[in-house]
Amino acid sequence: MKKLISIAAAGILLLGLAGCAAGGDTPAAGGSSEPKAVGDLVVGFAQVGAESGWRTANTKDVQAAFADAGIELKFSDAQQKQENQIKAIRSYIQQGVDYIAFSPVVETGWDAVLNEAKAAGIPVILTDRAVDSKDTSLYVSFLGSDFIEEGKKAGEWAVEEFADADSVKVVQLEGTTGAAPAIDRAEGFAEVVGKDDKFETVASQTGDFTRAGGLQVMEALLKSNPDIDLVYAHNDDMGLGAIEAIEAAGLVPGVDIKIVTVDAVKDGMQALADGKINFIVECSPLLGAQLVDIVKTLNDGGTVEPRIVTEETTFTKEQAIEALPDRQY
Ligand code: AHR
């Protein structure tokens, strides 16, 4: 029997009475049906890196949530490298942690290490990004945004913004190649603007979710594409890098070239308030409290939903000006 408790802002979590984890046959609480005292729990968290303002905010939020809950969190930074994340997960397995949480840098190539965690009876929780695996028993739950939806929201804004234009030349700054948010944000955006022939993507390149990457790619693209109308950046940081390149080229970001980004971190919101970015689709990094709730629920022998989608909004310039004073990240 399951009982759904839906809490919008702080956490959406299913508490259940059955002892089996929702993602498949992974046992709850490290293979033991006996709950541990919360203070005895150890969780290993394998983070992607520190590539963006979003990532830094996510790390801070997760660390603070576990500290507040009195649960030990072992933390590793993979510096955007899959091999580092795999090493970290193996080390958590060796150390016999109770749970492993991680945000996969890319979607594919996880089955071997996740099978090792499963064999050791350690439940895995995906946070922020998904893995592309047919075997859903390799993880208990995936907590994070709907990246396809985010791409669609960016596309819908673009269609409205350019309603009166005859043609729109688009440059896309992609996130890390192979990462779920890069794949899905491109897909969602293309699904919407692809219905309108006037949108032409003249270039689409990765800036690896970094500001330096956005700057470098945009500098090069401005040289080969003089008539860009719109930059769609898969995160704020790359959009902020593109702003620097556009200004260096003597153009006015937000006016000569419109910019739409994803994330809504403080620096991005400030650029939106200043008129340099035109629209931001929110992607919330505040996943810590929900992750703690998942761990506690599993420890108590409950079940969690296999997919928990983060609630998010969008921002115009006026909304950014209003939201900025209280923005947490
Ligand atoms: O996975 C979330 C994405 O990763 C964020 O949008 C981006 O800023 C980060 O690096």
Image: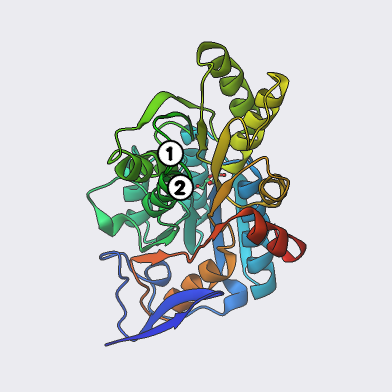
* Residue at the (59%, 41%) spot, across then down: 49
The residue where tag 2 is placed is 154
Element on which disc 2 rests? helix
314 lies left or right of 124? right
The residue where tag 1 is placed is 182
Residue 224 in sight here? yes
Q: Amino acid at mark 1?
A: Ala
Separation (CA) of disc 1 from disc 2: 13 Å
Residue 299 in sight here? no
Query: Residue 61's x, y, as percent?
Result: 65, 61
297 lies left or right of 292? left
Mark 2 sits near ligand 1, with its Cβ under 8 Å away: no
Q: Quadrant of ligand 1?
A: top right
* Residue at the (38%, 39%) spot, across then down: 186
Q: Are marks 1 and 2 in contact (CB under 8 Å)?
A: no
Q: Is residue 135 above or below residue 28?
A: above
Furthest residue to the left? 134
Query: Residue 51's x, y, as percent?
Result: 62, 38
Q: Is residue 30 above or below residue 234?
A: below
Query: Residue 77's x, y, as percent?
Result: 61, 42
- Quarter of the figure with the C terminus: bottom right
Q: Nearer the viewer, mark 1 or mark 2?
A: 2
Which image quadrant is residue 38 in?
Answer: bottom right
Q: Amino acid at mark 2?
A: Ala
Furthest residue to the top? 224
